[in-house]
Image (cartoon, rainbow, N blue to C red):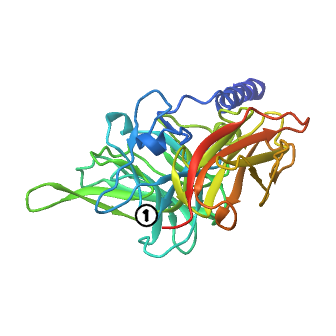
Amino acid sequence: MNIYKKSLLLTGSYLLACQLCYAEPPPPLLYYDFDESSIRTEYIVRDSSGNNLHAVLAETDTHTSPVQAIGYQGSGLYFNGNSLLKIGDHSLLDLNQYTAMAWIKYQDFSGNDGRQEIYEKVHSYWMNILKGSGRLRVGGIFGSCNDANRKWIYVDSLSAIEKHAWTHVAASYNGSTLNVYINGQLDAQTPVSGTVCDSDQPLTLGAKHHLATFDTQGRVLEKPVAFMKGTIDEFRLFSAVLSQPQIEQIMNQETGLAFAATIIEPLKRSTNMAPVSIFGTATSPAGVSQVVVGIKDNLTKKWWGNGSWGTWLLAPSVISSANATQTRVNWEFPFDPRASSGSGNYLLIVRVEDPSGTRSDPASLKFTVSTSP
């Protein structure tokens, strides 16, 4: 073969590889965005992939349930260092090749067994943060689960994960290489051969959940370890290997962007002890200029704005100003009526304003405040 023909073949192969690299990502096998408000009332985290791999929030004698909180995009799920989300076991979760990713924001704490588990399907695949170094560890067991030749292999990231900051983390296994991605970039990899071990253990977020222990009656005991303290958002699991450009594309995409405000806390018609934590998210395709909040006392019909009583002139309290290029922001509003109106029923209204001065439709809810136990 002459050099010219060889060059054409190599160029064609490269172009084909690039087309595959930049192709539209495949649909996920499992996708939790944690945005639905029903999480707080139905205690179910719904799978948006269409495969119905829903998870149920449930407390046991060994762990508590994570709670909905401000996420990277909309809402996320906060794990308090003794909580986990149990997806369970399903044949769809037995993967020979895969890609997993999420946005995380973690805190350091004692008692985490040397690591904080982001996700793990015991005896199959996992991702955790190492205590001390803060590095991301991705691993799995390769080969038959019952084979003496099975291999426990992992790779640690070269970079540490920053505490108290949102970081996009991803892992993939393509049949020959185990890869770690941080903020959309390949950070570390190690060669591996063989298929990922199948197991009957559950997939969990926020801890490792082992079902290998039994009580005197032969019942399976829950044995979670390596709890995480922090928030997970936008968790996706694929039964395919995504390229680096595809991982970065998903990392950068906006999901469900609308011109609207969302209230995460307090809950609708809930009773809260003063002071009340009020927070949520705001989105605008044109950019978020500011977020305005008003709280009305149902007894005096006055609006609470920026720490004082008075008439609400459409802008009772500007609580968040942002660069107009930001299309999604988190907002918080401290509310403490103990020195003024005291206990009672209140109406909360939130609006988003874009750079042109246009305001979104209001998000609103009623809640109750008690100033005494």
Image height check: is 70 above or below 284?
Answer: below
- Give whichever of 353, 226 is nearer the camera: 353
Residue 128, percent from left and from top:
49, 60
Amino acid under disc 1: Phe
Q: Secondary structure at mark 1?
A: loop
Extreme residue toward the left, this view: 217
Q: Is residue 114 above or below residue 305?
A: below
Kindly tell me whether residue 333 is visible in this rendering.
Answer: yes
Name the spot of residue 232 as percent of width and height, x first.
55, 52
Residue 289 sits in quarter = top right
Q: Quadrant of the N terminus?
A: top right
Residue occupying the point 33% across, 46% down: 197
Mark 1 neighbour class, 10 Å CA radius: few under 14, some 14 to 19, many 20 or more:
many
Residue 21 relative to residue 79: left or right: right
Q: Which residue is mark 1?
A: 227
Query: In the rendered view, would you say 291 is above or below 12?
Result: below
Q: Is residue 162 visible?
A: no
Residue 211 location in percent, x, y? 25, 55
Q: Nearer the viewer, residue 262 or 371?
A: 371
Q: Is residue 4 left or right of residue 58?
A: right
**Residue at the front extreme, as displayed:** 300
Horizontal side of 316 relative to 214 (left or right) equals right
